[in-house]
Image (cartoon, coloured by chain):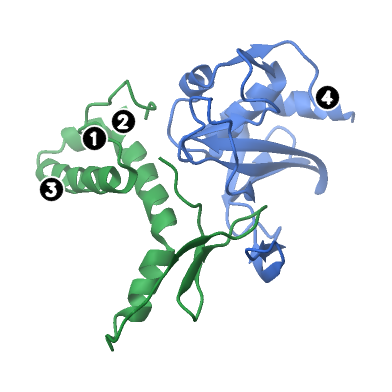
Chain colours: A green, B blue
Amino acid sequence: MKYTPGPWKLRPNGDMSSAPRGGKATQVCSISWGVSASDDKPGNARLIQCAPQLSEALDELMMLVTTPTVSQAILGSPKLLPKAKQIIDNARLVIEQATGEQQAVWPRVDHAKPKLE
Amino acid sequence: MRLDHYLGLIGDSKPEDWRLIPRPTFRHHFARFADEKGEEASVEVDEHRVAMSFAPNIRITLAYGLVSESNYRIDPKHKFGLLNARSEFADCFYDNLLVHRETVVRVARQRCVLPEVADWTTTPIKVPRRKARFAKLIHILAGPLSDFDEYFKEAGMVEVEAPWP
């Protein structure tokens, strides 16, 4: 599944466009804030703009924790392991939601998918 | 020094020969962003993600990570054709002069750095050995933590003895 590459930029009229290198901008969406006078608008806009980079960064972090060295270090630390498992599983679920692709449950690597180590 | 000798030194080098220097690389440039009509919409300062110096000969340096095309198109029939990819520059310097620019492609949602090829539909995709080694070096030094050889194979690429560049 493809997505419009980042960075995305929000214009004052609510149009969200990609700002790609080496190509024309393409419209991602148009945001209408409605009648809401919420103070969250700028924060929401920034979050949406960064969605592609957030997804890619999380994917890279997952690659890091899936490498044997890091996996073994986490698995070998009884103090760290329970919390780390929760955090990694959370990240895995978010990546699944963002990509629509099923991800291997840590620390197992699903060899049918693009290899992570 | 001849260019082929220079690139041979890089292609035959080992990852441990290189010292990585994170941003700032002091090789900033102005990146133009186009609007939907292709007209210049804004100009922003950009730079490579990382610079690298070659310890056995510090006249040789690399800089990697400037995005060339953030929406790089791989033929949809290719295994990686339906996943996001972007092309990036790996710039090669000698005595601080740009002597070669190699484009590499981060495929499969940026999960691996592979060499750029003209045609992604041939089987197998033949890649000059040095070009493949160069991309592998960049992948190992500054790319994601995935297995280059695995992706190279999955992409249908094979190394061949052919001149490069």
Q: Amino acid at mark 4?
A: His
Let me know if marks 1 and 2 both belong to one chain. yes
B151 shown above or below A66: above
Tell me where residue B30 appears, x and y as whole percent: 71, 64
Residue where numbered disc 3 is placed: A83
Q: Nearer the viewer, residue A27 or B156?
A: A27
* Foreground pick, B122 / A65: B122
Q: Amino acid at mark 2?
A: Thr
Which residue is labeled 2 in the image? A69
* Residue at the image position 46 percent from the left and 20 percent from the top: B150
Indicate the quadrant where residue B137 lies: top right
Residue displayed at 80% across by 18% down = B163
Read off the chain for label 1.
A
Dot 2 lies on which element? helix
Chain ID, mark 4: B
- State the SS at label 4: helix
Q: Chain of mark 3?
A: A
Screen quadrant of the N terminus of chain A:
top left
Q: CA distance from mark 3 to mark 2?
A: 18 Å
Mark 1 and 2 residues: CB-CB less than 8 Å, in contact? yes
Q: In x, y percent, where is residue A43?
A: 34, 76
Q: Earlier in the sequence, mark 3 or mark 2?
A: 2
Please tell me whether residue A111 is drawn above or below residue B28 in the rendered image. Answer: above
Q: At numbered mark 1, what does the secondary structure look like: helix, strand or loop?
A: helix
Q: Which residue position is annotated with label 4?
A: B5
The residue beneath circle 1 is A73
Is B160 on the left or on the right of B105, as rendered?
right
B13 left or right of B140 in image: right
Q: Residue at x 20, y 37 (%)?
A: A74
